[in-house]
Image (cartoon, helix red, strand yellow):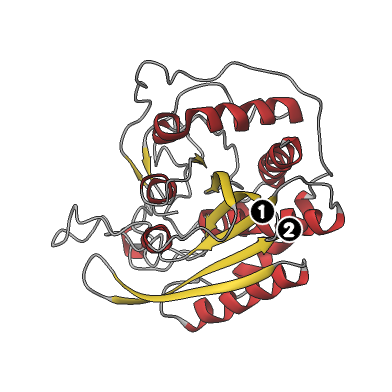
């Protein structure tokens, strides 16, 4: 995850206060955290999936194959994008569609690339080391692959589902680069997708972005930009978590405002999308958690209970759609 925390607990404008709890019965199949964890391993087996690397290209084909195995139609949206410092990045957005013929869809997304620099590591000698990105990248994709598996086995949804793996999210300017400080460079793949978005003959009701959804001790506060741009969808998702039994992971509290892939999806594609992203209000290293942009973002610091909470919440949302 290459997002930037703009605020740490920023207050929301009038009318965007955290949603109230509304209980519903649990719905949908049981999300397997063990299966999702295995999909995290599958991605990390290639090593860091940094832009322009062989591991990046190999992992793209692996992800594509997983979605195809689950019965999805898959499109690779490829483009050469310009990084914050002008570096050309060979980007591939992986777009999987479940039941594309249905008239209305829900969008689920995550980024799949790895941060090329561990620029928040406590050891400055590691600042130029690529990040394995077990949580910050692989976890969100793993949840989506497991969701696709369950959709194939439990075909009772009333909507189609688009599962998009955005590329080139985590190539924002590193903290040690003072020459290009403040030049951004985040969420490039999502911005490209949103800028070229054309309706596919169906309506997209809303979207959910999954970012760092497998970390130890994670809680998912209601992200500020999501509340501003898609408040009703925040209500839907957080109430779904409560109904599924995971309100402890999804407190009805305000988090910070984050620059992430959901911003261009909202602003350019016009699809209301919320960001499920952790908020650690008392973490000294980062409000995104202690492993954010460090070499410790590896399989040893994933928690399958967190994957379960997020995955089951997504299932609850999807199978509650009329």
What is the quadrant of residue 58 in the picture? bottom right
Q: Quick one: SS at disc 2?
A: helix
Label 2 or label 1, whichever lies nearer to me, is 1
In depth, the one of 157 and 3 nearer the eye is 157
Q: Position of residue 309 (x, y in %)?
A: 69, 38
On the rendered image, what quadrant is the N terminus found in? bottom left
Residue wearing tag 2: 148
Residue 244 relative to residue 142: left or right: right
Can you identify the residue that label 1 sits on?
A: 161
Q: Is residue 97 shown left or right of residue 256?
A: right
* Quarter of the rendering occupied by the C terminus: top right
Q: Position of residue 36 (x, y in %)?
A: 72, 56
Kindly give the residue lying farthest to the bottom in the view shown. 54
Gap in Å between the C-alphas at discs 2 and 1? 9 Å
User: In this view of the protein, which residue sits in the foreground, 169 or 160?
Assistant: 160
* Whether residue 246 is situated above or below residue 102 in the rendered picture: above
Can you tell which mark lies on residue 107? Answer: none
């Amino acid at each position: 995850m290459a997002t930037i925390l703009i605020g740490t607990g920023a207050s929301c404008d009038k009318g965007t206060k955290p949603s109230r709890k509304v209980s519903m019965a649990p719905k949908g199949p049981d999300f397997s955290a063990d299966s999702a964890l295995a999909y995290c391993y599958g991605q990390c087996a290639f090593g860091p999936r940094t832009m322009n690397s062989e591991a990046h290209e190999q992992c793209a084909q692996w992800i594509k194959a997983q979605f195809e195995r689950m019965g999805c139609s898959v499109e690779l949206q490829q483009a050469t994008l310009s990084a914050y410092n002008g570096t050309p990045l060979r980007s591939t957005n992986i777009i999987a569609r479940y039941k594309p013929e249905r008239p209305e869809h829900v969008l689920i997304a995550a980024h799949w690339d790895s941060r090329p620099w561990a620029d928040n590591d406590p050891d400055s000698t590691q600042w130029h080391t690529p990040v394995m990105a077990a949580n910050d990248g692989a976890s969100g994709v793993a949840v989506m692959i497991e969701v696709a598996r369950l959709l194939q086995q439990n075909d009772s949804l009333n909507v189609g589902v688009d599962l998009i793996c955005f590329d080139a999210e985590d190539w924002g300017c590193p903290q040690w680069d003072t020459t290009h400080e403040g030049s951004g460079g985040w969420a490039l793949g999502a911005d490209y997708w949103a800028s070229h978005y054309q309706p596919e003959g169906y309506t997209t009701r809303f979207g959910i972005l999954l970012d760092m959804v497998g970390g130890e001790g994670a809680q998912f506060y209601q992200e500020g930009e999501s509340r501003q741009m898609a408040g009703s969808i925040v209500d839907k998702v957080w109430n779904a978590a409560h109904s599924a039994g995971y309100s402890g992971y999804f407190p009805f509290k305000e988090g910070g405002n984050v620059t992430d892939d959901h911003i261009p999806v909202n602003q350019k594609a016009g699809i209301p999308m919320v960001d499920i992203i952790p908020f650690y209000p008392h973490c000294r290293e980062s409000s995104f958690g202690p492993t954010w942009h460090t070499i410790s973002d590896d399989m040893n610091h994933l928690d399958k209970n967190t994957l379960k909470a997020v995955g089951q919440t997504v299932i609850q949302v999807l199978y509650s759609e009329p």
